[in-house]
């Protein structure tokens, strides 16, 4: 298979910090070029416009790149500025825009294939989780790492983990559930593609490919979906029964045990309680039945509550300045 080298192509369309390439055969490739390939407000706008414009007539889209990272996550500097200015209404709007964009991507009528590699973190991973197929490199380091800066996955990432958890049995698969919860609470990243599959970020059948063939394989996967008559999920949003009060108690007890062991800090415990609320759907109901949108509403509410705690601003500021996590 002939490799695709983006450096040899000229963008079909350029945006503020992203580009769109024509890969041929009706497939386009959307790439980031922000600092660390972070998901900036302008990238969100460009992607939303592409969805609004029917992918400019292309039959399918690959989201990938050939820079150092796939995506280092959210634009933290912009977020800290909003927090320090107490612009919580703007934050809420921005979060809702990204949630709706990732949800729309998941149910889009044309195939979207992602090609994650190396650092695929936070908001970048949320984008990957909502795509129709993933073609990873083996060196992929995937993680929803928001807890390290006093937040939780707020672009649909928490919702996607809650959906995966909802299909597991508390009685028979509790170790797996606790492992998934810990991954969010501790901000764990995968060591490779096999590890990412164990963390439920990749499907079992999504095998790793070499760097030189990744975009060509992603294009091939996108073409395959087109040729099988892909039209998206006609059934619409999932509605799932979450674990409710029983699961909430299990998860928060686990977080408390991690605090007692010195693994997490007191503020991590508070973040863990909010993550547990999203995963369980309720602190009090036995088996709440929620739509994806209702889980997103809960996710957004918990995220915004954390932005209003001064310890979150302290964590983000410390990370941007020192490039390390603050355990406050």
Image (cartoon, rainbow, N blue to C red):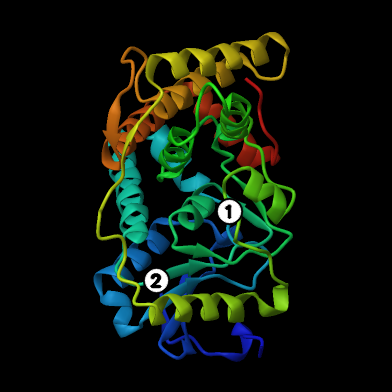
Q: Position of residue 210 (x, y in %)?
A: 73, 72
Residue to which mark 1 is pinned: 202
Residue to which mark 2 is pinned: 111
Image quarter (top left, top right, bottom left or bottom right) of the N terminus? bottom right
* Residue 225 lies in quadrant: bottom left
Q: Residue at x 40, y 28 (%)?
A: 278
Using a 10 Å C-alpha cutoff, classify the residue at mark 1 as few (fewer than 14 neighbours), some (14 to 19) or many (20 or more).
Answer: many
Image quarter (top left, top right, bottom left or bottom right) of the C terminus? top right
Q: Is residue 8 left or right of residue 78?
A: right
Q: Is residue 280 above or below residue 138?
A: above
Q: Residue at x 50, y 33 (%)?
A: 168
In the picture as drawn, the residue positioned furthest to the top comes out as 260
Q: Which mark is residue 176?
A: none
Q: Position of residue 19 (x, y in %)?
A: 47, 76
Q: Position of residue 272 (x, y in %)?
A: 52, 22
Q: Position of residue 224 (x, y in %)?
A: 47, 79
Q: Of residues 202 and 80, which is closer to you in this image?
A: 202
Local SS, label 2: loop
Q: Of residues 24 and 83, which is closer to you in this image?
A: 24
In the picture as drawn, the residue positioned furthest to the front comes out as 172
Using a 10 Å C-alpha cutoff, classify the residue at mark 2 as few (fewer than 14 neighbours), some (14 to 19) or many (20 or more).
Answer: many
Q: Residue at x 72, y 14 (%)?
A: 262
């Amino acid at each position: 298979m002939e490799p695709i080298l983006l450096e040899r192509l000229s963008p079909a369309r350029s945006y503020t910090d992203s580009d769109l390439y024509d890969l041929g055969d009706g497939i386009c490739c959307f790439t980031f070029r922000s600092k660390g390939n972070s998901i900036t407000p302008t990238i969100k706008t460009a992607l939303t416009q592409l969805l609004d414009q029917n992918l400019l007539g292309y039959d399918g889209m690959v989201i990938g790149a050939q820079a150092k990272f796939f995506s280092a996550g959210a634009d933290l500097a912009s977020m800290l500025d909003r927090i320090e200015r107490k612009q919580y209404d703007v934050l809420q709007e921005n979060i809702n825009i990204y949630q709706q964009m990732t949800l729309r991507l998941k149910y889009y009528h044309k195939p979207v294939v992602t090609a994650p590699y190396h650092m695929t973190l936070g908001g970048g991973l949320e984008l990957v989780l909502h795509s129709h197929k993933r073609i990873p490199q083996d060196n992929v380091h995937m993680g929803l790492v928001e807890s390290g800066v006093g937040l939780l996955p707020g672009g649909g990432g928490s919702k996607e983990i809650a959906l995966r958890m909802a299909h597991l049995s508390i009685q028979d698969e509790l170790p797996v559930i606790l492992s998934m919860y810990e991954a969010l609470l501790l901000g764990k990243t995968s060591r490779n593609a096999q590890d990412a599959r164990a963390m439920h970020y990749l499907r079992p059948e999504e095998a790793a490919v070499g760097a030189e063939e990744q975009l060509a394989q992603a294009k091939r996967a996108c073409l395959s979906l087109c040729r099988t008559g892909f039209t998206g999920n006609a059934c619409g949003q999932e509605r799932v029964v979450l674990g409710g009060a029983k699961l909430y108690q299990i998860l928060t007890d686990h977080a408390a045990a991690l605090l007692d062991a010195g693994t997490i800090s007191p503020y991590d415990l508070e973040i863990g309680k909010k993550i547990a609320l999203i995963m369980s759907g309720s602190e009090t109901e036995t088996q709440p039945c929620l739509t994806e949108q209702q889980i997103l509403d809960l996710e957004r509410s918990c995220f915004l509550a954390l932005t209003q705690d001064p310890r979150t601003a302290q964590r983000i500021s410390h990370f941007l300045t020192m490039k390390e996590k603050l355990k406050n």
